[in-house]
Amino acid sequence: MLQTVEAIIDSGGQFHFLEPIKFTKPKRALVTFLYDENESMISNIENALLSEEVLGKDWNRIEEDEAWSHLQ
């Protein structure tokens, strides 16, 4: 069974769970890094805007239109 718990990872790489959690044996985990209150998504938006012109050259090709025409 999958279980999601929130944790803070300090600058030393140590996990601090925000709720008590107990394991009966070692567990595998996937870690997703989230934005905290002090971080901004502006950099991701800026990256998308800066990429648009370059990607647009590929997206706006006739071959690309033909490849996707079956979805129109």
Image: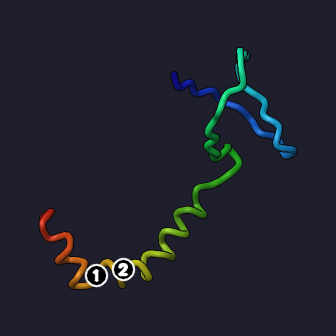
Numbered label attached to residue 60: 1
Q: Residue at coordinates 22% horizontally, 82% vertically from top-left? A: 63
Give x and y (percent) for residue 44: 56, 62
Mark 2, residue position: 56
Q: Residue 27 vs residue 71: left or right?
A: right
Quarter of image, res 62:
bottom left
Is disc 2 surrounded by few (<14), some (14 to 19) or many (20+) residues within 10 Å? few
Question: Which amino acid, by three-letter code, is at mark 2?
Answer: Gly
Q: Residue 28 in the image: x percent, y percent?
A: 65, 33
Q: Secondary structure at mark 2?
A: helix
Query: Which color mode does the image show?
Result: rainbow
Quadrant in which the C terminus appears: bottom left
The reply to whether dot 1 and dot 2 touch (C-beta < 8 Å) is yes
Residue 21, percent from left and from top: 71, 18
Q: Is residue 12 above or below residue 15?
A: below
Numbered label tally: 2
Label 1 sits on a secondary structure element that is loop
Cα–Cα gap, marks 1 and 2 = 6 Å
Q: Residue at x 12, y 66 (%)?
A: 70
Q: Amino acid at mark 1?
A: Asn
Q: Nearer the viewer, residue 46 or 12?
A: 12
Q: Is residue 27 left or right of residue 2?
A: right
Does residue 34 lie above or below 6 as drawn?
below
Q: Crowding near pointer 1: few (<14 within 10 Å), some, many (20+)?
A: few
Please state if 1 lies on the left or on the right of 14 as rendered: left
